[in-house]
Amino acid sequence: MRILKRLALIVLIGIACMVVLGLAAGGIVYWLIEPRVPSVASLKDVQMQVPLRVLSADGKLIAEFGETRRIPVDIRNVPDKLRNAVLAAEDADFYHHSGIDITSTFRAAVEVVLHRGEKVQGGSTITQQVARNFFLSPQKTYTRKVTEILTSFRIEHELSKDQILQLYLNKMFLGHRAYGVAAAAQYYYGKKLDQLTLAECAAIASTFQLPSLVNPLDHKDRLVARRNWVLGQMLSHQFIDRSAYEQAIAAPDNASPHEPPVQVEAPYLAEMVRRQALQKFGNQALTDGYVIRTTIDSHLQALANHALRSRLEEYDHRHGYRGPEAHVALPEPATPDALEQALSGYNELSNLLPAIVTASDGDTATAYVQGGKKITLAVADLKWALGYARKAKTGGKGAASILQPGDIIRVREVQDPQASSAPAAKAAKAARVADAKHWELEQIPAAQAAMVVLSPDDGAVESLVGGFNFQLSKFNRAVQTQRQPGSSFKPFIYSAAFSRGYTPASIINDAPIALPDPSKPGGLWTPQNDDDKFRGPMRLREALAQSVNLVAIRLLDAVGVRYTREYASRFGFPLDAIPANLSMALGTASVSPMAMARAYAVFANGGFLVDPYYIAEIDDRDGKAIYKADPVRACRTCEARLLDEGRTTAAPAQPASAAGDPGALPDTANALGTGESKGPLLAPRVIDPRNDYLMDSMLQSVVDHGTGFAVKQLGRSDLAGKTGSTNDHHDGWFCGFNGDLVATVWVGFDDYRTLGHGEFGAKTALPIWMAFMGPALEGKPENTLPMPPGIVTATIDRSTGLPAPPGDTNTMSESFRIEDLDRLRAQAKEQQNKAPAYDIF
């Protein structure tokens, strides 16, 4: 008995010693490690990495930039079935422990002893995972594990259980750059959290442990096995009943990649916004959750995309089929997998799908379209290519003359023409016809185009297209290219002439001219009209409408190159972009489509120079506005009121840089203004309102009976503009407007090749402008500038440009500044008893 008591005493003493030693060791460990335990106060206001989002003016997504996919979500918006799935998979006792699971931790410690000190995985609660992911490294050491446990206690002391779980659900990496459950739900299933099924919730919960190896896209068998295990855990913990379990177990996993649902295709503008954000906010711009609302109108942007691409393709068709993009040996056997492999290096571009010709015999060819569809191309589907080939005598009449097996081509599915004209009385037949589609041969245009649409009142960029396809070429021709504007520059010369006393009725002689050529010692410069014809004396209105080069040169020479060059800079052009010689009259300046749109906005808004901008507002991750644009505005009534009050808020004019960003944010990117402004900040007036009215009238003549005559097809009388073409047709332009919109279109080759014989701006750029402006203004009332004070109309003689005498039948009505008309009347009176004279310069 004594022996047993003695043994018991020894055991008790041993246990006590072990407890004392354990407490001492724990105290020593705590004393050593506690100073290294991080403060968890920052978790109360943690800032997750959230990508930059770019929106249109009406709130639709244009782009998302950032390396991580994350959509922060409040714990209150996490469905119970998803919350329970995560708890069942990771920490079912989460709401009941104090930061660590004693049983799991003891089990992990025993495993360490049994494995003779080898580190093992396991025993981590959700709180411990939060501690590890926010504060600690993934390195497996005893010190880090103890630090993790101590940090978990601190987290539990500082935060509620819901706060901890919210951090966990938003922080964890779940594969494929998706961080957090909301981003995972959107990427894998294209759903919001409240749209997920029970099986999908379990699948997302399955990715927490090994997201790179077990996720809904990779290793599907592993994912389903893990998902079913999670569902079993949910059943055993009574989160779901047997019926829900069996239904979820039987459900297939239909995950597939879902990129953010881009609603507005404006990649060139999105890239401009991204660069501005990086310039102002640094790399944090892509991780701090900024939301940038642009000035882009989603409807107008869609119209601009369609107009530019469809009409550029029409131009491309006029110049024939250039052959396949590539030619490969047709795989044997030509299985779908083999054909897909042959097409793997090609992507869809602006609805032009890659395909490989599998057979070509006689009138038809068959092809395999990327994605699995087999199609037949008949002669009618190749008519534009065959027609050009016959005309050029490079091909025959059938498909085999231009297509060969192994050709990599582009095709598009289009609606049958008869679908829109099916008889309403035959409803069933009409329905069948409406579904009828066919495929046509296409090709990626070799030429490029750009389009800019501004609001003339404040310079807001309402749509912008920098090229045929951003994926094909990221070079933004809307703002980065510097091209010669050709005749579209002439209105600025005419406006300068009006400021020097010329009128729309002034007569200039369209006749041959020879001037010294500084580039050729002893040589002469002998410019020509586009049609190589000479019309003799003609009024300026007609000269601009018909875009007569020699009249523009003589007019510039009379007004003065130096004066006109400085005058043109009023429209925002840098002086160094304008040549200091008479070639200016032919449009040899260096400009971008954005610069031309800004300049034409002066004509559209009554004479004010506005600054183009495309960022309307920047919000932080909490939705608080940290920047709002306050653009200068054109306001004729405001100007009169401010002058009456003896004050002005006009801003100084800022010339556009040669290739600079027109929408650059101000230096103080978070300045929202004081709210103390007594009125709008006015854009500077750069030309007289009467000059502006006369120029609008002149530019309306261009579309009424001049080189822009095709615009009449739109059935509106408020449109004005000017075509532009350069020597050898390297560039085609049309710049036009009404009171609501200014739109500029450029067409050309990046390598400055010619667009082809007869490819004037009226044939290349104008169709794009019309295809946009027609639907853009559909249903809107006409909007033109009112006649300002000091403008009068008078009847003139068409030949002399002077006020018509009584009995003159060769007359027309013309607009003048009142002082110019008085001068012309005096001149006409002096000439009454003399030979016929002209108001000629």
Image (cartoon, rainbow, N blue to C red):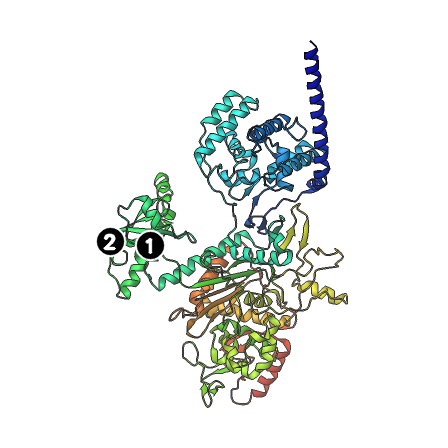
Using the numbered discs, state the Cα–Cα distance from disc 2 to disc 1 in whole angstroms: 19 Å
Q: Residue at x 62, y 61 (%)?
A: 664
Residue 215 position within the rendered picture, expressed as x and y whole percent measured from the top left: 49, 37
Residue at screen point 55% across, 22% down: 236
Rendered image: mark on residue 408: 1
Q: Residue at x 40, y 79 (%)?
A: 532
The label shown at residue 43 is none
Point out the frontmost of discs 2 and 1.
1
Identify the secondary structure beneath mark 2: loop
Residue 51 is situated, as x and y percent measured from the top left of the image, at: 58, 48
State the residue in front, 96 or 32. 32
Image coords of residue 364 (percent x, y): 26, 52
Are there few (<14), some (14-19), or many (20+) residues within 10 Å of tag 2?
some
Q: Position of residue 389 (x, y in %)?
A: 28, 63
Q: Nearer the viewer, residue 432 or 197?
A: 197
For label 1, the SS is strand
For the C terminus, the quadrant is bottom right
Amino acid type shown at disc 2: Asp
| Badge count | 2
Say which amino acid is labelled 1: Ile
Query: Height in image: 247 above or below 186?
Result: above
Tag 2 residue: 363
- Compared across the picture, whether 840 is left or right of 127 comes to left
Q: Quadrant of residue 822?
A: bottom right
User: Left of 65 or right of it: where is 254?
Assistant: left
Residue occupying the point 56% across, 53% down = 297
